[in-house]
Amino acid sequence: MAPEEREQLYERLAAEMCQDPAVARGTMMGFPCLRAGGEFFASLERSSGNLIVKLPAGEVSELVNSGSATPFAPAGKVFREWAEVQGAEAGEWSSLLNRAREFVLKLDP
């Protein structure tokens, strides 16, 4: 799937997520993002069309080890609770977005 198609998928899923009053749009490091409870939980890297999600570090490791994602490392600094997902299947992205939203909503303020 081309980056433009991935961006369209992200926008469709983001619109669905924003039906939840706890979810809002914003920007993070210049990327479009989603927030819940004031915390960033997902973003889209526009040039590649990759989904970036915040998940527990163990889950990020599992995604990376399975080859489904790479560590999110802007400017070479790895963020252990963030994964960059290359694949673009609507069901997978929807599941990741939901898990990421639930993860940040459980974080202590």
Image: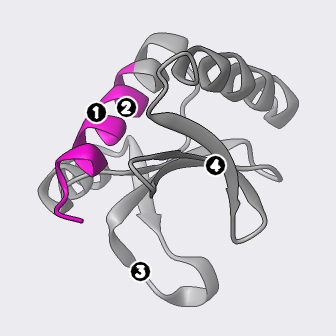
In the picture of the structure, the residue carrying the numbered disc 4 is 33
Residue 84 screen position, x and y as percent: 50, 53
On whether residue 86 falls in the magenta region, the answer is no
Q: Which mark is residue 78?
A: 3
Say whether marks 4 and 2 touch (CB < 8 Å).
no
Q: Quadrant of residue 8?
A: top right
Q: Secondary structure at mark 1?
A: helix
In the picture of the structure, the residue carrying the numbered disc 1 is 99
Mark 2 → mark 1, Cα distance in angstroms: 5 Å
Say whether marks 2 and 1 touch (CB < 8 Å).
yes
Residue 96 screen position, x and y as percent: 37, 31
Side of 62 relative to 86 (left or right)? left
Indicate which label's residue lies in the foreground, 4 or 2.
4
The local crowd at label 1, few if under 14, some if 14 to 19, many if 20 or more residues have their Cα within 10 Å, is: some
Q: Residue at x 87, y 31 (%)?
A: 4
- First in sequence, mark 2 or 3: give its number: 3
- First in sequence, mark 4 or 3: give its number: 4
Q: Residue at x 45, y 19 (%)?
A: 94
Mark 1 → mark 4, Cα distance in angstroms: 15 Å
Indicate which label's residue lies in the foreground, 4 or 3.
4
Q: Secondary structure at mark 2?
A: helix
On whether residue 108 falls in the magenta region, the answer is yes
The local crowd at label 4, few if under 14, some if 14 to 19, many if 20 or more residues have their Cα within 10 Å, is: many
In the picture of the structure, the residue carrying the numbered disc 2 is 96
**Range of the magenta residues?**
95-109
Disc 3 marks a residue whose amino acid type is: Val
Disc 4 marks a residue whose amino acid type is: Cys
